[in-house]
Image (tube, rainbow, N blue to C red):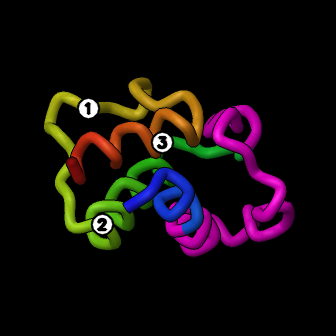
């Protein structure tokens, strides 16, 4: 799966996780900050992790926390590593 395919699927997850992110979803870039640009809370991050695990069939490591992901690109990179 390419990085762009992961990014496109992640955009769908973002809309499901936080409906307010629907506006401007097509303009998102990998450099978008989860907390600052998207306004994610720790609860939203938890929902996103669960949705990613289900969508991609991966499990997040127990030692990974919300602080490990600053941008969408960080999340995409993590998913890439888990799928490799």
Give the SS element for disc 2: helix
Q: Is residue 65 left or right of residue 35?
A: left
What mark, if any, has residue 56 been given in the picture? 2
Residue picked out by circle 1: 64
Disc 3 to disc 2, how far (Cα)?
21 Å
Q: Is residue 47 above or below residue 67?
A: below
What mark, if any, has residue 48 been given in the picture? none
On the image, the x and y values in percent for residue 18 come to: 62, 65
Q: Is residue 9 left or right of residue 52?
A: right
- Badge count: 3
Q: Is residue 26 left or right of residue 43?
A: right
Residue picked out by circle 3: 42
Residue 51 image-quadrant placement: bottom left
Q: Is residue 38 above or below residue 27?
A: above
Query: Dot 3, how many residues are within 10 Å of its Cα: few (below 14), some (14-19), or many (20+)?
Result: few
Q: Is residue 83 above or below residue 10?
A: above
């Amino acid at each position: 799966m390419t990085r762009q395919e992961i990014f496109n699927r992640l955009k769908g997850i973002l809309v499901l996780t936080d409906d307010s992110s629907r506006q401007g979803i097509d303009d998102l870039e990998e450099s978008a900050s989860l907390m600052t640009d998207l306004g994610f809370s720790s609860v939203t991050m938890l929902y996103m992790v669960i949705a990613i695990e289900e969508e991609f069939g991966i499990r997040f490591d127990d030692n990974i926390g919300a602080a490990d992901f600053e941008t969408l690109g960080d999340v995409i990179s993590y998913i890439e590593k888990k799928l490799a």
